[in-house]
Image: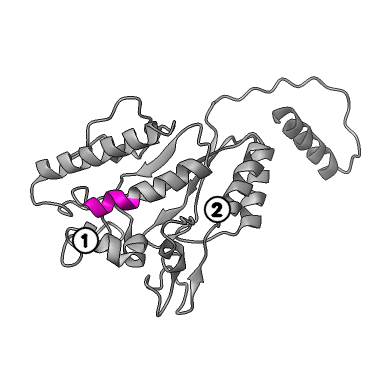
Amino acid sequence: HRGAATLRQVLSIAHSEGRSSVPPMRLRDRPRFGYRGLMLDVARHFFDVPFIKRLLDLMYLYKLNVFHWHLTDDEGWRLEVKALPNLTTHGAWRGHGEVVEPQYGGGPGRYGGYYKQEQIREIVLYAAERGIAIVPEIDVPGHCYAAIRALPGLLGPAVRRPSGGPRSVQGFEGNVLDPAAPETYTFLEAVFSAVADLFPAPLGIHVGMDEIPRGAWSDSEEEERELKAMLVAWLQQFLAARGKALLGWEEAFHGPGAAPAPKHNAVA
C-alpha cells in the first residue's frame, strides 16, 4: 500500500512539472507515527458515500491509516440500527416539522441522511483495501439529543432531567442518557451490537463519554462520578465480550467527576 502511494506521489510531481517519466531513484520512506489519523464528523454535516470514498482515497495517497468516523451526535444519527429503525427514520433528519430542529444554517427544509448497513460494510472494505482502519464513534451518554427525540417511548424514561436541567456546552437540554435507567441499556445493547457486527474495529470502538453537563444526573458530584463509572464499566465489559476495545475521550477517565479507567481500555 505505502510503496504504491509513494510512487503516485512521485509521479504526480513529475506530471506537475510536465514530465512523463522519472529518473531511477532509491526511496527510503518510513512513517514517524504508527497512528496517522483523520476524523470526520458526519452528524453535524452529512457526507454521502462517494465523498467518504474520495476522502479515503486521499488518506491513502497521504499514507494516513486511521479513519475516525464520528457517526452520531445531538444534531443527527447516521448509522442504521435495524433493531431501532426510528433512529434513522427520524433521528437522521432535521428541519421544521422534524424531531430535530434546524441547525447550522441548514434552513427550514429537511436536511440529513444516514448510512445503510450495506453501505457501512462497503466503506469498511474500501478502507481495508487501502490499509486504513476505521474507528467508529457512537457518542454516549451525552450528545444523544437526536436519539432521544427519535425514540421518546424508549429513551424518554432514560433522561433524568429532560427539561429545565443543565444545558450542554452546545446548548442542548435533555441530551444525556441516565446510567440508572434500564431503558438506557436496552438502547446501548442494540446499538453497540450492530456496531460490533459492522466494524472489525481493530483499534476499538469509540463511545465518546464527553461533555456531560454537570448536574444532568444529580446535584451530588460524587453520585454523578459513580454513575459514570458504572456506565463505563458496563460498556467496557459489553465490548470486550465481543472482542472490541473501548475508546473514549479523556473526559471519561480524567478531570472532576471522571470515572476510574477500566482495565484493558484505550483512551483517545
Distance between mark 2 and mark 1 Cα atoms: 28 Å
The N terminus, quarter of image: top right
Label annotation for residue 157: 1
The C terminus, quarter of image: top left
Residue at point 33% right, 53% down?
A: 187
- The answer to whether one can see residue 113 in this image is yes
Q: Label 2 belongs to which residue? A: 117
Q: How would you rate the neighbour count of disc 2 (Cα within 10 Å): few for under 14, some for 14-19, many for 20 or more? A: some
The furthest residue to the left = 220
Residue at point 29% right, 66% down?
A: 152
Please check the rendered image and state whether residue 178 is part of the magenta-colored stretch, yes or no: no
Quarter-wise, where is residue 126 in the image?
Answer: top right
Residue 44 x, y percent position in the rendering: 45, 60
- The answer to whether one can see residue 171 in this image is no
Residue at point 67% right, 51% down?
A: 54
Residue 88 x, y percent position in the rendering: 46, 63
